[in-house]
Image (cartoon, grey):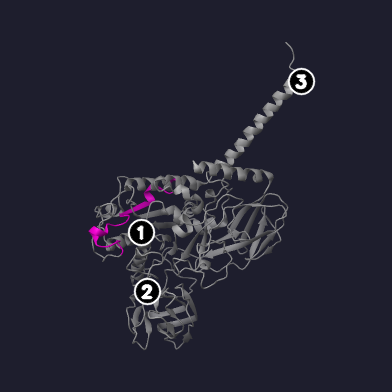
Amino acid sequence: MKKPKKQTIILISACLLLLICVCLFFTEIRNFLYLRHYEYTAPGYVDSFFAGKKVLFLVPHEDDDSNLAQGVMEAYAEAGSDVYVLFSTNGDHTHPAKTRIDEAALAAEANGIAADHLIFLGYGNDWDEEISGYKHIYDAPPDHPMTSAAGYTSTYGTEKHPAYRNTVSGEPSPYTKASYINDVETVLLDLKPDIIYCIDLDEHPDHRALSLIFESAMGEILKNPQNTYTPLVFKGFGYCTAWDGAAGYHGKIVPSTINPADRSYAYNDDEDDNDYLPHARYYNWSERIRMPVSPKILSYSKRASNAHKTLSAYRSQNAIANFEKIVKADKVYWQRPTDSLLYHAKVRPSSGEALCLTDFKRYDTDDITGKDTLDNNIGLWFPDEKDEKKTISFIFDRPQTIDRLVFCENDSLSDHILSGTLSFSDGTIIETGEFRENGAPSIVETGHLTGITEFSFTIGESRGGRAGLTEIEAYCDDDNADRENGLTDRTAFLKLTDRDGNYIYDYLYERGEELSFNLEYFSHPCAKMPEAFDVFLDGEKIKASCNKDEIKIENDFKPHTLTVSATNDGSLSDTVFLRPYTLRYRIMLPIVKWLETVRDRQ
């Protein structure tokens, strides 16, 4: 037998080498497409914020859990917290309830949430105005019976997931506003979650209704004279910051949620009184709370993200088409304190109806289906035109300590309080000055006033015929507050951001890039922000420019683990991975983006 020629051996070797290279190349593509979610190490805030809690998410439709909290739900579940999700409607207007409920169960499984922790209230998705006489259940009188768009008159579910009231009493709830509020209140008192996340006033009437119904239920609980339950409450949106938000996912990092008002990355914005959301003026973008998400939903491709499986479960809504709008490096909320001293105070106005000032609702309407920004027309106290006093008084049943007051006025930009006077029972007089005109909370620091039995607020100058208030709250900064739900100053987190304010987890950096980072910090109201932070690189403490506003480290174009922790509390920390943006990433990321774009169009 003749020996193979040298050229043949070289050709075969080259073919084998090419085959190996091709296999490695496609293996790498597969890794980026399906396996490479951000590398994960449990940062300190997992224990300080996400672990050991009972958490409830309230959303109207089966898929709004992803809009409101994709990545946040998983973070709690991964940390071992008890996570519940409440769906208030069956989403049965365009698809059968069984389809929507089964999809929610699949999505919950992907998120690590137990099936028996899903709560379906079983109310209708949209309403039959011709039969019911009202466009929406929220606009109807409390006990007025309603018929849903799907033709039902009482709550229902499926065999595996019956409606909540059926499981509690054996009978469904009639479709009335009073039953709706009562069912939500019953869930809150049954579970007594430490932390609550609820949808806010999106453009959809069902979103708006659940937001206000939750606040009605929460208000009734807080006003109960025997109540000691004061959970952390966060309100957020499903549309403007998710479903209808700005798309953007592929790249060196997954970006954070951007301002829906101007679609800009206005992270380090000044605290401008007028940076309010276009459809919810009572929220200022600069005052949002930015929650970290589970790194498992972040990756270099959509298909490697755990959220891809979750959103794919909602096939009837084609939720996966909005992946890049929903999945971000943070989720944004606005906090609603629940420990105001005024819930149990007597309210005495010089004129007008003033019970709305202590009902927990900063907004209310009798036309939930109105377009764009709703008219805050029934949740407002304003004095009669002929009232010369224009005063509201609060009387306590026992002496109180007050550190600050919070005023929320009519969000109408044409009606505005320009000045006011506070008078306290100890003789203290405080001029409040002008309130924020968009309805966002105006905080008046009173100093540490003790032994206060009553106080009053008098409107001074104003403009417009409906210059008034939607809510007044009073707070005492008591570090030793006895809270039934057990939340303490350990309910806190800090998160590293890049120079643009994006939350970072697995960070690719360029050669020669200035490695400068900032810190975002959130804590329970009883907690105080740490005064100093320590920086660790690969586990070793390093010298660095270290304060909240700027953390700098040397760029040596090598992979590192960066950890920042509070100097006096090492458990309050964050850890991120720093990786050089090598040729490997420069080649693979554009290819992965192109492949996913092609597949998404099919």
Which of the two discs, 2 and 1, labels the residue nearer the N terminus?
Answer: 1
| Secondary element at tag 3 | helix
Q: Using the image, tell me which numbered label, if any, was put on residue 6.
A: 3
Q: Position of residue 571 (x, y in %)?
A: 57, 59
**Closer-to-camera residue (76/385):** 385
Residue topped by disc 1: 206
Q: CA distance from mark 2 to mark 3?
A: 91 Å
Residue ID at (23%, 58%): 131
Q: Is disc 3 surrounded by few (<14), some (14 to 19) or many (20+) residues within 10 Å?
A: few
In this picture, residue 252 sits left or right of residue 70: right
Magenta part of the chain: 109-138
Q: Position of residue 563 (x, y in %)?
A: 63, 56
User: Given the image, on which type of amino acid does mark 1 rest?
Assistant: Asp
User: Given the image, on which type of amino acid does mark 2 rest?
Assistant: Thr
| Secondary element at tag 1 | helix
- Relative to 287, residue 309 above or below: above
> Does the magenta segment cover residue 306?
no
Q: Residue 58, located in which quarter of the rendered image? A: bottom left
Q: Position of residue 381 (x, y in %)?
A: 36, 78
Q: CA distance from mark 1 to mark 3?
A: 76 Å
Q: Using the image, tell me which numbered label, if any, was put on residue 358.
A: 2
**Which residue is at the far top?**
1
In this picture, residue 347 sits left or right of residue 588: left
- Relative to 48, residue 591 above or below: above
> Does the magenta segment cover residue 113?
yes
Q: Is disc 2 surrounded by few (<14), some (14 to 19) or many (20+) residues within 10 Å?
A: many
